[in-house]
Image (tube, rainbow, N blue to C red):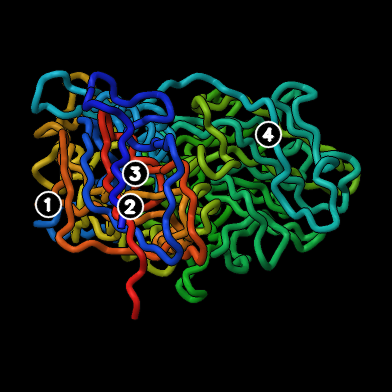
Amino acid sequence: MSLVICSNLIEDKREALQDQSVNEAFSFRNELSSTLKIPANSQVAVQSVKVNVDGRIVVGKDNGNFYQYFGDKIDEPAGETLEEKTSKPVIVRIADGDKVLELSKTDLAVEMQRAIRRASYHPNQKNQATVENEPAAGEGFTITYDSNNASASNVPTAMEYYGNTSARDPSTAFIYGATPGVFQRNLGTNTIDLCTGIARQDPMSTVNGSLTINISSANANANASGVPWLVGLSRSVNQQGTKNPLYTPPYWGASKNNTGFINARTGGGAGFLDFACARNDAGELVLFHSLCNASNNNKLSHYEVEYWNNTNSSFTGAGRFDLNGSGADVYTRVRFKIAGERVSCHLYNSSTTSYELVTEYASLQNANTYFKPVNQACWCLHPVLSVGSTPGNLSCTLEFEDYTGLTITGYDATDGVNGGWYETMEYVGATNECLEVESRAWGVSQTMVATNYAQIGLNASSTGPEYDHVLILASNRIYNGTQGANARRLLGYENSLIDDPVITPGKPAQAKFHSDNDPDITTTQALFVRLNNFGQKVLNARMGNRSNIICHLPRFDNSFSTGRLHFEPNNLMYLDLNNPYELNVNEFDISFCYINEQYARTLTGQSIVALHFREKPKM
């Protein structure tokens, strides 16, 4: 039998967090001056371990996950539930996957800010959250949510094809930008019913954001030519449907064909949109939006908005307004506006030089006379334009007059990481989360009228939606679907549900959350010892692979703290070295890791591991 003492240093110096060499506290090698002979069929066990743990905070998926909610706060005493709202909590992961982070308090604030921003999907909230490390002991962190409501005309510089790609070349469908802001149907696409493009660069602001398109002007002749056209807003659907070549959500159903926007020449219609204003083949003004159909497993379909029954509208009557009618040629622009959840549509009257309301949300109106609320699945909306054709009119145009898109650093509606919530869920294959939101009563065609949902507008100063910020730090029954939240101690809060942020005077869109305490530096991560240059057989089932781990360092009192820690098992666990012949050993390679096999870099100073070798007992 042999007892081997391994250590990275000859003394317990702790001035530096780690020694940047082969003698680091978490990974080191001891070379022998003479060969150690270990008999065949031997075993090894850890006799004792001494380590030093520094004061950094260890963050993993077992203590670094929480949820944030941006929407109308739930009033439980009043009987409200999450299923009535247009938002749902989204998870914030400070550490990705099985990764373990070892952070100072300052670094933790940086990582928290990065994670919160990555999980902020509302366009006016993107890149606005900040996390500050409060310097005084016991103060923890301050999380500040703010809103970007900058309103500047931001006409897109590029548009992408957004329609049926079956046996068609999207690159020839239309020309955009030859004249700045002008969308022109290509002469070579006369077989395509609707030539559709989407501008994915910048999402539309929901704080009085507007999209204005010329339908009759020096550079826009679609309406004057009598061809079908469409002006709309849509989330960025980046994957084609499984049953058709259109870009549609996976839970898209067959069109109800009740939108009134059907191109009679080809029998075709528009691709997916959230909100649309259009001229159909009959020259009628048509508005439609996407709602769930309870008769078809709550799949989305386009439903017409009966604006003519909205008493606030300038276009009330017996049915759709006739754009071919006498005097209708004075309408030269279409405008969409968004204020919180409320989408309105207007037409510009060039004779009176004013905009006339087509429809808007109003509490006393029937819900099928105005657009659905902007909800979490379509927070990030982008302009969509379509131009049809008639014989002799094959290359008609629409033109951007203005667009208040938000310029967001790093925003990308197509990469599934830096876009909206729907786009992220689509990328990770979790659009069922979006369906759960959209199939709530206010979004189902058969129940939206009876529900009469009160759409949320802007706050009193029009600096942001009249929404609330909520932190869910542990699984919560009120904000259900928050399993896996476990960051209460890490963030320094006494309670697991924080829904009363401090509102900064003069800044109603800004909400601050102050920790109750400093973050808890007690790690929940177990430590393991690895012997890397021997032949023991160990399976790390958590990671699903072979490992060199030979010992788990249990926690004495269910908390792994800082400073000098000593471990000595009462019963040694011997592992076979699987050496049928004598081993000649010249060095020992020792390291410390977490369950994911990542180095435990919080170790500092002197680490000692005492190994006990013996021949395997005879059976």
Residue 102: assigned label: none
| Lower position in the chain sequence, tag 1 or tag 2 | 2
Residue 215: assigned label: 4
Q: CA distance from mark 4 to mark 2?
A: 38 Å
Residue at left offset 22%, top offset 60%: 81
Whether residues under marks 4 and 2 lie with C-beta atoms below 8 angstroms apart, the answer is no
In this rendered view, identify the residue nearer to me: 465 or 343: 465
| Lower position in the chain sequence, tag 4 or tag 2 | 2
Residue type at tag 1: Phe
Q: Tell us which disc is closer to us: 4 or 3.
A: 3
State the image coordinates of residue 99 (x, y, percent, origin top left). 40, 45
Residue 100 falls in which quadrant of the image? Answer: top left
| Lower position in the chain sequence, tag 4 or tag 1 | 4
Q: Tell us which disc is closer to us: 1 or 2.
A: 1
State the image coordinates of residue 268 (x, y, percent, origin top left). 74, 60
Whether residues under marks 4 and 1 lie with C-beta atoms below 8 angstroms apart, the answer is no
State the image coordinates of residue 319 (x, y, percent, origin top left). 55, 57
Q: CA distance from mark 3 to mark 1?
A: 18 Å
Q: CA distance from mark 1 to mark 2?
A: 40 Å
Residue 71 falls in which quadrant of the image? Answer: top left
State the image coordinates of residue 472 (x, y, percent, origin top left). 22, 48
Residue 556: assigned label: 1
